[in-house]
Amino acid sequence: MVLKYALLALILFLGLQKETFATHIVGGEMTYDCLGNNQYRINLKIYRDCDSGIPWFDNPASIGIFNAQTNGFISTVSIPLDTASNDTLSLNYPDTCLPPNLCLHATVYSTVVTLPVNSSGYVISYQRCCRNYNIVNIIDPNNTGMTITTEITAAALLSCNSSPKFNNEVPLHLTVNDTFSVDLSATDADGDSLVYVFYAPFDGGTSGNPLPIPPAAPPYNSVSHHAPYTYQSPIGNTLFNWNPSTGELSGTPTISGTFLVGFSILEYNTAGVLLSKTYKDFTIQLTPMPCNLINSLNKTTITPTIQLFPNPTHNELTIETGTEQEVELRLYSIQGQELLYQSFRKGTTIHLATWPKGVYFLDFTSNNQRTIKRIVKQ
């Protein structure tokens, strides 16, 4: 199980360290199976950070069922958390450039609902706020939520159709300037035709109401992208080759950061009639971080503990050590470029108002002891 999810855990490198002030949802998907006699099993899979434990998986999770044509509310279904399906996806991967304590939680909520055949079809949705604050391609991610949804058309109801299932786990980690090829395909038990497309991930919930009960009715607002990013070009100037027939994604990323990506599967029967829409919402972590700096991220040897505040920060970062011994400070960009050097005793303040938003690393040394800290400039 661990090896199966090795790539999945890598994405948490920058966004989900133990120093993070809050924890957020990483992504999710929803699929369904027709059991016959108008009975459908709904499967909701959610990914979250397991490093600092907030928020825990919802118990119960609340999904809403809506009329696909009128968007009218039909019912709310509460799905208890099944601890047996709560899988801790720990990292055990032979890459020495990775810190050893990364992990991810994934859980599957499953329930059976009755969906009578009608001429409208159904939309089934789950909403949760909020996303990782260091996502760089959308506006205000820390106050932007997520809607995981699926659509079952009237034609799917008539044929007792089941949705396609993803073959491989994502999100994933990619390395800047390394060519990659990723299989994002799915398998359909009914043998229907599948078309893979990018979509703009849906917003849902707010920081004030992170778990709407019932979830809001469709249509759903898409997240707002920072220019020049779009849902079709979620990683800016990186050129991707996307095969809509096979779900293969390939290319060479040229920039680093944490990026929100959405792709969906359109399922058609042999007559070309749309049966279902399945969505997957996930983040990609791109980093060229130097190996020696990555290996030092969780090694804290300076005593007493260095304190940084506020983190994340907008303008200034205050550093306190509480000791008279001299400390040397080097500040690095996410690309590993040294941007600042200074030495101090007891404490200092760094002015960041003119610096670009993003993730930076502080490398402290004193008496041959070393500590690495991560900060976020908002």
Image: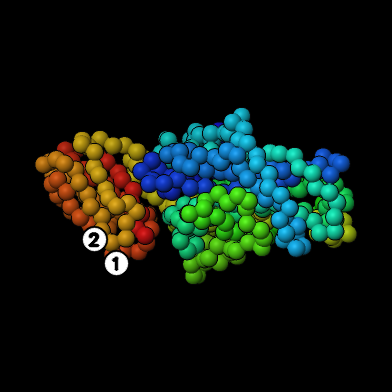
Where residue 195 appears, x then y in whole percent?
74, 58
Kindly state the secondary structure of the residue where label 1 is placed. loop
Relative height, residue 101 to residue 145 (above, below):
above
Foreground: 253 or 163?
163
Relative height, residue 51 to residue 237 (above, below):
above
Task: Estimate the spatial distance between the alpha carbons at disc 2 and disc 1, rounded to whole Å.
Answer: 8 Å
Where residue 114 appears, x then y in whole percent?
79, 44
Q: Is residue 98 left or right of residue 165?
A: left
Q: Is residue 254 left or right of residue 160?
A: left
The answer to whether residue 70 of the structure is visible from this angle is: yes
For residue 351, the mark is: 2
Residue depicted at 42% across the width and 39% down the height: 52
**Most extreme residue toward the left, as rendered?**
324
Q: Quadrant of residue 221?
A: bottom right
Where residue 361 appears, x then y in whole percent?
32, 50
For residue 354, the mark is: 1
- Looking at the picture, the colour scheme in use is rainbow
Residue depicted at 49% across the width and 70% down the height: 227
Foreground: 212 or 83?
212
Where residue 71 appears, x then y in whole percent?
72, 61
Foreground: 266 or 187?
266
Q: Label 1 is placed on what type of residue? A: Thr
